[in-house]
Amino acid sequence: KEAKSNSDYSAFVAMKIYRKRDLQTFEQTGAVAAVVLEVAYGKWTQTQIAYELAQINKRWMPRAIRIEDTGGLESFKVYAIKDAFGRTGLPFHHITWAPVEQGYDAKRNRIKSLEVLLKADRLFFATGPWNDETFNQLSTYTGAKSTRTKKDDIPDAMSFISRFLPSSDPKTPEQQERDVQQAESEFAAKILRAQHDAMFGSDNFSFTPMPV
């Protein structure tokens, strides 16, 4: 997610899409899931934002980078990114700029879709120093507008993963809303479990993502 100025928070999320495998047989189960590999966030200038983006790109070498185009980013696109990526010796042609979604409750519905993925055991988290802030923003998200003290930048950045995951049949907005409402009751428990696993480990979870 891109910020308009250094008074705002920015967040980048590195995620991997993979086809789940049975932990006993290692055969593919057919379900496609995602794992959050890293989250980078902070109050940065545009130069720092470009640097952080170039570094996370260098660490994970993603096939695609999607950035929300909030407007007024011409110099950032033309100069800052070119310079930051140039210092790593890596190209930036895989960056795409997505328009800000303007639909009613578009951001809320997009973030709430993460609950559906969690309920279906299709969203996982690697362990890292970013876990606490990520789980805090996820567990306290209510759909209300972000404020200085209550941020939602990380869930917002994460939510775009649903655009890349296949679904069986297109669902109507009403069906999507019902899915969200059904998942909300289980969302807090999922986050608490992820927090517990991140802090104490899990006896029944060993994750090695396989490419799709």
Image (spheres, helix red, strand yellow):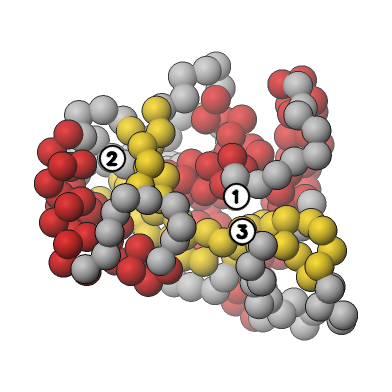
Amino acid type of the residue that numbered disc 1 sits on in the rendered structure: Ser
Q: Is residue 168 above or below residue 124?
A: above
Q: Which mark is residue 3?
A: 2
> How far apart are the two marked residues, 1 and 3, measured between alpha carbons?
23 Å
Dots 1, 2 in contact, CB < 8 A: no
In this view, the residue farthest toward the right is 25
Q: Secondary structure at mark 2?
A: loop
**CB-based contact (under 8 Å), mark 1 and mark 3:** no
- Residue 21 drawn at (x, y percent): 79, 70
What secondary structure is marked by label 3? strand
State which mark lies toward you, 1 or 3: 3
For label 1, the residue is 139
User: Observer-nearest residue: 209 or 42?
Assistant: 209
Q: Quadrant of residue 109?
A: top right
Instruction: Please tell me how crowded label 3 is: few (under 14), some (14-19), or many (20+) other residues with Cα within 10 Å.
Output: some
Compare marks 1 and 2 and give the one earlier in the sequence: 2
Q: Residues within 10 Å of mark 1 (few under 14, many from 20)?
A: some
Q: For the residue labelled by badge 1, is the local secondary structure a helix, a strand or a loop?
A: helix
Q: Using the image, tell me which numbered label, if any, was put on residue 17.
A: 3
